[in-house]
Image (cartoon, grey):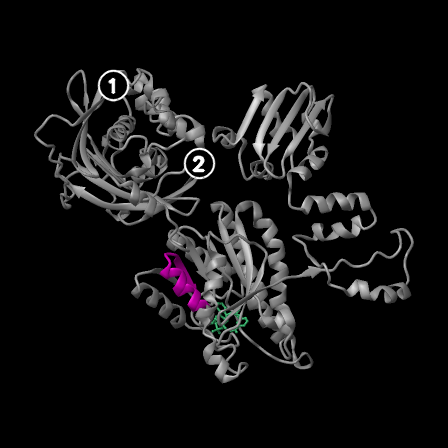
Amino acid sequence: MALNLDAVGKKIGPIRRDYTWKDVVLYSLGVGAGFDELEYCYEGSLKVIPSFSIASVFDFLAQVGISSDADLSGILHGEQDIIFHNPIPTEGTITTEGAITHMYDKGQGKGALVVAEAETFHSNGKKLFTNIFTIFCRKDGGFGGEPGPSESVEIPDRAPDFEEHASPAPDQPLIYRLSGDIFALHVDPDFARASGFEKPIMHGLCTHGYACRAVIKHLFPGEPERMSRFRVRFSKVLYPGVPITTQIWKVEEGKAFFRTVNDQTRDVIIDRGIVEWISRAELEARSKPKGIRFDGRVAIVTGAGAGLGKAYALELAKRGAKVVVNDLGGSRDGRGGSTMAADAVVEEIKKAGGEAVADYNSVATPEGGEGIVQTAIKAFGRCDILINNAGILRDKTLAKMEPETWNAVMDVHLKGAYNVTRPAFEKMREGRYGRIIFTTSAAGLYGNFGQANYSAAKMGLIGFMNTVKLEGERHNIKVNTVAPIAGTRLTEDILPPEIFSKLKPEFVAPMVLFLASEQCPVTGRIYNAGMGYFNRIAIVTGDGAVLGDGGEITTPEAVAAAMGKIKSLDGAKEFGSATEAFGPMLEAFNPKEQAKAEGATQDLSVKRIFERIPDAFQADKAAGVSVVFQFEISGPTGGSWNVTVKDGTCNVAEGKHQSPTTTIKMKDEDFVKLIKGELKAMAAYTGGKLKIEGDLMKSQLVEKLFKF
Ligand code: NAI
């Protein structure tokens, strides 16, 4: 079968992978790191060897092989070039997406090169690295294509500036393969013999990891995050157990050439190596926040052909988002349709150097909603942000409002938001990230004559948000609502002309973009935005009055008498869910429970933590446990407390215990952070913020026995 030239440019991915510190350490062990480079092997102070980047995208590489239709019996990993954009975190989810970019022809019998490029983003939103893979297809040359470029590496005519010897263990591939490259050639003796080798061979990428460690050690020791490029050509096979040497020539500040040789045969096994690195100052500059950006994010904006939606789409694209510009292109009351509105905005984005695709579906049907999300997936492979903005008006007083008028407005605003949000939410869940914005209106929040349909739909969105925010919480999906005020065709006959011209839609965009960003800390909130004035709207609940004891039914007269207290919003509270809101009613008849609940919402202090320890105690986890913890908390709010756990019970006392099993010493502020889960016990311990005396092992029971 010949190479599939049509595969060039076709998207591969997104391919997602979750990884933890254990994957990072496993990779480090696989490429020979050990006690000498504990920073690669110990979670207490872990750093990621940059070549981990290729181990993390094997699936992408496999897809390249398959979609190129190359003769798999003749393919070899030829070259690997990696550009690093940001340090690789020690855990998270990475998403890789790319395409085959070129197929080069070396000539009949000389093979072909398939080049693919992939970009990888971390769940923290940062672009981590770009991998450029060159696969040598020995049996696929002679299809009449270009021979392709070649980057020369002129090794200086002098002895290497540095040499690093290493002795991969005879069993090295058995560890390395656990990082994902489980090809039988590196483990199965029969397979290796059938492929023409005397036994299983080292993974080229395993030796690549050795070379990567070697250059870091000699050029920027202990600072792998400074690597900005690592490029190699794989030139010869190596057997496990054979010692190797990486030879390094520094050619300028920030750049060196290298190669790795087989110490027994002097064969060069990794050739034409180029490593580049950045200064500490540049690294620091890179890690400084660059404001709110959306690079790598895909945003859908409904009704983005005009007015507010257009302003959001343009600004999102300017800040790096790939945007789906949805618009039906109809009239103000939702009738008709045209592709022109969406097309014009897409063109404007592209002219300014951004990425966007038009979508003409109506939000008013479930199929339309599905179609909009599919446009995002087909064009960009994901969906991170959804701004439900499309809107129409059909104003009439209630007396004149026929069902058709009522329904048309419901269909676009309320059902429309459901139609698009449902499939988008699904994609966000898969990506473990999402930002959803609903658009409400002052008409719904406060009322507006002649807009009963619109007001009801707009307020319905608040109810929708209140529940979706709860369902999105554990998937890192935040859902908020904006109530804009802007001069658009929807408001041209509502707002006085002098105000209309001042209320530019661009004034609303900053709030919407903030709510759409990774930096957005809130969910379930409503904000007014217009002309540079922003404020929050909330549904709050008053303290109310308790009439009776919960058994006897009260009278209308008693309600009338207590109306002053019932209607008062003094001390009103906001609740995060219906369950939370029921709490005060139930607790009103149970003072003891009420005190506890208030305590739960209070800001934690050290004293309060020890008061709450009996509630936080997990009796089911304490079977057979007998321990006395002595807490010595320093700082202005500190003190001494001891906690005895025995026979499934827990006892807290102020002061010092005579013979504690384990003494835990911390500063008050660190202790509060630890209990709130903002500081990890292990990090606190390794960072010197948590000191333990006595039985160290028993200290680990604290996290298990108490849940706040
Ligand atoms: P606009 O009329 O300029 O933009 C709305 C866009 O939605 C139009 O381009 C329209 O073609 C599109 N659209 C309508 N029905 C659609 C459907 N079924 N499917 C896809 N696209 C559709 O109006 P504006 O002011 O920009 O409105 C945006 C949103 O802001 C609306 O939800 C509106 O209710 C809301 N809003 C606006 C206020 C303002 O002061 N302009 C005040 C409060 C809320």
Rendering quarter of residue 617: top right
Magenta span contains residue 312:
yes
Magenta span contains residue 346:
no
SS type, badge 1: loop
Magenta region = 309-328
Callout 1: CB less than 8 Å from ligand 1: no
Q: Residues within 10 Å of mark 1 (few under 14, many from 20)?
A: many
Rendering quarter of residue 57: top left
In the image, 160 versus 229, the foreground residue is 160
Which labelled disc corresponds to residue 91? 2
Residue furthest to the front: 636
Amino acid at circle 1: Tyr
Give the residue at x 36% y 46%. Answer: 287
Amino acid at circle 2: Glu
Residue furthest to the left: 157
Give the residue at x 68% y 78%. Answer: 398
The answer to whether residue 328 is visible is no
Whole-percent x and y of residue 452? 65, 74
Q: Is residue 162 left or right of residue 660?
A: left
Residue bearing mark 1:
239
Whole-percent x and y of residue 393? 55, 75
